[in-house]
Amino acid sequence: MAAEPVAEAAGLSHRYGAKAALSDVSLTLPAGRMVGLIGPDGVGKSTLLGLLAGVRRLQAGRLQVLGGDIAEAAHRRAVLPRIAYMPQGLGRNLYPTLSVRENLDFFGRLFGQGPDERAWRIDELLAGTGLSPFPDRPAGQLSGGMKQKLALCCALIHDPDLLVLDEPTTGVDPLSRRQFWDLIARIRARRPGMSVATATAYMSEAEGFEHLIAMDAGRVLASGGPADIKSQTGADTLEAAFIALLPEDRRDGHQGVVLPPRPSDGHVPAIEAEGLTKRFGDFTAVDHVDFRIEKGEIFGFLGSNGCGKTTTMKMLTGLLHPSEGRARLFGKPVKSGDLSIRRRVGYMSQSFSLYSELTVRQNLMLHAQLFQLATAERAPRVAELLDRFDLVGVAHQRAPNLPLGVRQRLQLAVAVLHRPEMLILDEPTSGVDPVARDRFWELLIELSRRDGVTIFISTHFMNEAERCDRISLMHAGRVLAMGPPGRLCEEIGVPSLEEAFIAHLEKEAEDAAPEPDVPRTAADTARRPARAVFSPSRAWAFARREATELMRDRIRLAFALIGPMVLMLAMGYGISFDVENLRYGVLDQDQSRESRGFLRQLSSSRYFDEQAPIASLSAVDTRLKRGDMTMAVIVPPGFGRDLLAARGPEVAIWLDGANTVRAETARRYAEAAFQDFLIELSQDETGITPRPSAAEIAPRFRYNQAFVSAQAIPPGVLMLMLMMIPTMMTALSIVREKEIGSITNFSAAPVGKMEFLTGKQLPYVAVAMVSFALLLAMLGAVFGLGIKGDPLALVAGVALYVTAATGFGLVISSFVRSQIAAIFGSAIIVVIPAVNFSGMLYPVATMQGPAAIVGHAFPTLYFQRISTGVFNKGLGLGDLWTNHLVLFGFCAVFWALAAVLLRKQEA
Amino acid sequence: MLRALHNIFRLGIKELFSLARDPVLVVLILYTFTVAVAVVSKGVQTEVRNAAIAIVDEDRSSVSARLRGAFLPPYFQPPQLIGYEEMDRLLDSGRVSFVLVIPEGFERDLLTDRAPVLQLNVDATAMTLAGNGTAYVQRIVQEEIARFLSRAEATTDYPASIVPRARFNPNLHSVWFLAVNQVINNVSILAVVLSGAAVIREREHGTIEHLLVMPVTSLEIMLSKVWANGLVIVFAAVASLFAVVQGALGVPVPGSLAVFALGAAVYLFAATSLGIMLSTIATTMPQFGLLAIPVFMILFLLSGGITPLEAMPDGLRLAMQASPASHFTAFSQAVLYRGAGLSLVWPQLLAMAGIGAAFFAFALMRFRATMAAVR
């Protein structure tokens, strides 16, 4: 094809905080070729690939991709449809609850493909990758190899000209790996113009690439074909060449790993499994597995992804209970609660499971403490491990900032920290560079041969499997073969372990997948013209996907719809300013007919609820302090006598001022009761009714004639619920993708912020409208509150209000870093103005100072007006339209704010 | 035993590190216990203060002029004089809560002893203000009329009087009430959200599984979360009472902050356990967020802070006895306003501890069960 390179970098530098990832890199990627980046962990390979794909922001230098400057937004918009990016990690850009087909469909829609085009493309890609039998399986339940194939399909759906793959085969078994690269080779045969840029930790794979770029410490060491590189370094294998390329200090002391023979010391069994079986529902993950591992032995566990290796290991550690069979460690049955066994075992799980909020050194120190190393021993041990695993330089960095390989080394260091007698290691070296892997193996061998540590290890690297005393091959929950590596090769009659392995697997999988066809990628399909600023179909692609995920998560949906109804009931009845059951106690020091007359007036009132009498004056305070009454009534001695003698006696009431609303109410009612008593008394004694007031004041309680809280509060609860739930739902939607990693799809695809935000918002607006319908029905059925005003004003108000609420959630989500902060933020930021400043509990007109400002700067106040306006006051759009207008303004402002805060590219 | 305590301590320290590493979260916590407390308690009025009233004066007499001048700050904003036709609009828009209508011929009728009627229109959707405000308006009007008629101080015809005095808050300032209430409410939200989310995060990141293969028990993991999150919140709450409520807002707190801190610690044990319990019911962060809303809203609004428990329907009142926040509200009001000591509030402490223990036991059971089900 073209002589013009697909990408050209000059003086490219990139740093994360103080750490430089790339320093002054200049290189050229030839077009139409398969270009591989090789190098140790953390040398800037991922950064370079991210920059190439346009998902990272260019910091310094120039980078031309597909004939233009990738730093320019206009060029990015133009070329993103021609680039496909597959990030590091197994299926990191997939949506685990979506099925295989739905994942592909989403990517197809993102690139604006019509239904017919998507259908044939998906069928072809599935057929080409052997995924056809499982179109409806959720992506989260695929094995690692299948996930990577699906991720590749997603990348290929739009016929990219540049395919950027970041360690696509890390953690993938040899058979799947071979299939993966075969697939890419076949696609390239059909589309020779396509360029591929990739990184890999497997040197055997790199041998097959056309052009290699060797990197170290953010710089390019060498580039050229594999043969060139080997001849430059005078090495026979790429692995050796790679090591030779490293600077002196990096390969310090590196030599080939040799496994000394194991001293025979009585063959004490360390791990025994008998008929070990684990079922999840009707799926059998591990099917009657037996093995016996001796003390000091290095036992390798090989098998395809999803064959049950991890499950077996988890049963040995006590994390899972076997459905059947027995496992014994050191001759004792495995019990999940047995701490003494845990202290003797070191376990490393497949996924990174250390604390991302702690630094490397802090993680090690924490484990040293949890494993109860002696205080004096901790610091030297941690220092030793930092040195041994080459972590000194990153000791003060936090784990999320580290490359995969370095994180793996940290996990290994943690696993061996307490000098366990047994190590159970689940793919400990996946993603780790060859030098570090060899170092690690030297350590394992030393532990095994010198200290008699038993090592149970799973791996996808065949050169590692060859170093084991014995290995077992596992497939579909069963052990296919077991024995020393050499003997397994002999049995099958193949020269290498890899071929023995693949032979075994292929024999098993014979009937599973026929040799797939090559996808007929349509090079002749007309490329869509440059796209509009806002494409409804892309927004719809995001909305559909978000909605599908939401519909799959029935629990979340139920919480979103049932929660508000429960709260409506509880708060509609529970929040009450009605005067009832005011608790009071009496100290009657008079005990006369008159005092009893007054007290009867109180006790017969439905507003008051009499408690036990107060024993003495000194008890008044204690009772009030304890809070078992709101009011104490004290009738002084001689009250009756003084009253009749017109000496103007005084009854004292003491109110609990702690709850001010309650105290005011109690005072008002006590005074009224006292007046009634006096009037009655006067009538009884003298037959004269005291002169009534000169004028009468007739209060008319508008909107709520009965003056009951059950009329006034529920419209406010509606306001609260339609704010809080939608905000919470969208507040997590973006930050969750940031935590999980699927946010890269947004970075890598030709999608505008507005399309993304709309897609995120629509499904939740729909859920909120459903929730509104349910609450509306409830208001009528339970509280007898119908729409008195204009229904249109209400529906329009709700639509605007929930759009504003979801918009506010998006603002939070774009801004925060963690889901916890998003939950907490949307709870606390929303609750305070919604409850206090909206007019639900306290009238807006009385608010002062910052409260009034905050109240007016939040949508709740305006919707509260609409809600009470329609439910209590019988108002229409003509009276309320200004509130609608303000709500619309909030929608626009929140949108703009979310768009500003949302980052399209990563740092 | 010593070993367990050591682990609980260490894991708790780790928990504190996680908090410190999320600056947005730290800022939010600070905001919650400072700005949020101050703005709400200064801005919101539960007593009759600053109420908005309008007067329709169709009499234009000397008595109506006196009435117009009788509504004074701080209880009322200066009355707006409006025409009758404006009344509905002002009430509809919520701009005034009361409209007093003085009919034509009011003074004449008053002087000729024909007992004229004044109409008071009240916006009854503003429940807190409407009831007490009406009583205020009635009293002010009656006193003003009496003064007008006798040209002297109003004297009562009644042979005896009732003298109300408010204990603990003599002038019934709502800022006293609201400030402490805000602190209590924020404690609830924070405790439930932080502890629960801390567990879910560990589960989503796979770190819980890692802990479970180490010599650490579920009990230790849970207790470490309880103490670390609890400590942060107790500290924030006490500091907020000291610096914001007492200092910036000038609310006298007669009670002992030490007793309050003790009660807060017991309450946080219950509330964080509740949060962890929720985290064993929800499996993902979005689920947890939605599940937490009803829970903390009920703790927030129905635990006696806004509506006293005795004013609730019987069933709900009984149900709210199971909420640790009900007991904490009662405890805090007794200690902080009324200066009650341990001898008076031990029943609440006991109730909180009991409820907390029940939550904790349930959470531990569920926690172990969900851990066993981890793939």
Image (tube, coloured by chain):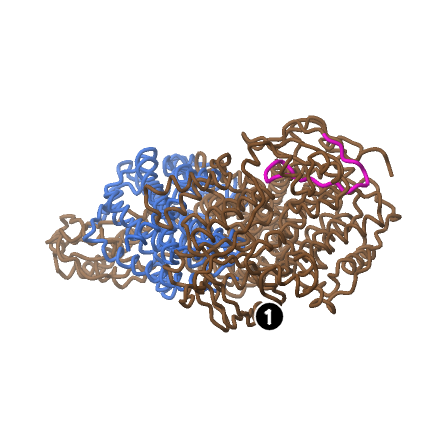
Identify the secondary structure beneath mark 1: strand
Is the N terminus of chain A in the top left, top right, bottom left or bottom right quadrant?
top right
Side of B10 relative to A809 (left or right): left
The numbered mark 1 sits on a residue in which chain?
A
Q: Position of residue A144 (x, y in %)?
A: 64, 56
**Viewer can see residue B314:** yes
Residue A631 against residue B236 in the figure, above or below: below
- Residue B83 locus on image (x, y percent): 52, 40
In the depicted structure, whether residue A425 falls above or below residue A266? above
Asked whether A661 or A487 is in front, the reply is A487
Q: Report whether A593 appears left or right of B259.
A: left
Q: Which residue is mark 1?
A: A283
Residue nearer the viewer, A178 or B215: A178
- Which chain's colour is blue? B
- Residue A871: give x, y in percent of width and height: 54, 55
Residue A896 makes an appearance in the image: no
- Quadrant in the rendering for residue A343: bottom left
Q: Which residue is painted at 47% across and 67% down in the image?
A: A272
Find residue A235 and report its image quarter. Answer: top right
Q: Quadrant of residue A480?
A: bottom right
The image position of residue A724, as x and y in percent, is: 52, 50
The image shows a total of numbered marks equal to 1
Chain with brown colouring: A
Mark 1 neighbour class, 10 Å CA radius: few under 14, some 14 to 19, many 20 or more? few
A713 or A272: nearer the eye? A272
Where are the magenta residues, as a range?
Answer: A27-45
For residue A859: magenta? no
The quarter in which the C terminus of chain A is drawn is top right
Q: Amino acid at mark 1?
A: Phe
- Looking at the picture, does residue B357 appear above or below residue A352? below
